[in-house]
Image (cartoon, grey):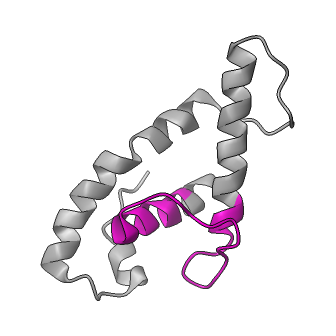
């Protein structure tokens, strides 16, 4: 599930050039992406609080590997933009997704 939504976030960033995903974003192009981003932001904040010895406000967690993956989003998306400019900004999301890195 993380990988699918991470790819959705990758495409969102590449097309919109920001990660300010509305919490309510849930459509056929980005199913449940808004909830996923909100949860991961809360989980990241909780991990920062735990590292400082404070109790987090919720039980949301995220591991170091996923944190590292999300941090690489900007550089990976800028590479994607160079490819997408060749293809065209009007290509479908499904076609654009074929350029995503495969795990």
Query: Front-most of 41 and 88?
Result: 41
Residue at image x 63%, y 83%?
27
User: Residue 21's quadrant in the figure?
Assistant: bottom right
Residue at image x 56%, y 38%?
66
Residue at image x 35%, y 82%?
95
Q: Is residue 81 above or below residue 73?
A: below
Query: Front-most of 97 and 9?
Result: 9
User: Residue 90's quadrant in the figure?
Assistant: bottom left
State the count of labels: 0
Residue 19 drawn in magenta = yes
Residue at image x 35%, y 56%?
101
Q: Is residue 68 toward the left or the right of residue 30 in the image?
A: left
Instruction: Single out the residue that lies furthest toward the top.
Output: 53
Residue 80 x/y as whole percent: 26, 62
Residue 41 x/y as whole percent: 65, 45
Q: Is any part of residue 62 visible from this angle? A: no
In the image, which residues are magenta? 6-35
Q: Is residue 48 toward the left or the right of residue 61 in the image?
A: left
The N terminus - image quarter: bottom right
Residue 92 x/y as whole percent: 37, 87
Residue 62 x/y as whole percent: 68, 36
Q: Is residue 60 above or below residue 35?
A: above
């Amino acid at each position: 599930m993380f990988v699918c939504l991470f790819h959705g976030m990758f495409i969102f960033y590449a097309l919109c050039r920001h990660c300010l995903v509305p919490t309510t974003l849930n459509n056929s192009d980005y199913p449940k992406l808004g909830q996923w981003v909100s949860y991961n932001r809360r989980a990241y904040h909780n991990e920062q609080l735990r590292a400082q010895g404070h109790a987090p406000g919720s039980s949301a967690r995220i591991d170091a590997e996923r944190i590292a993956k999300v941090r690489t989003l900007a550089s990976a998306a800028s590479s994607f933009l160079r490819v997408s400019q060749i293809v065209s900004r009007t290509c479908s999301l499904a076609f654009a997704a074929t350029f995503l890195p495969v795990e």
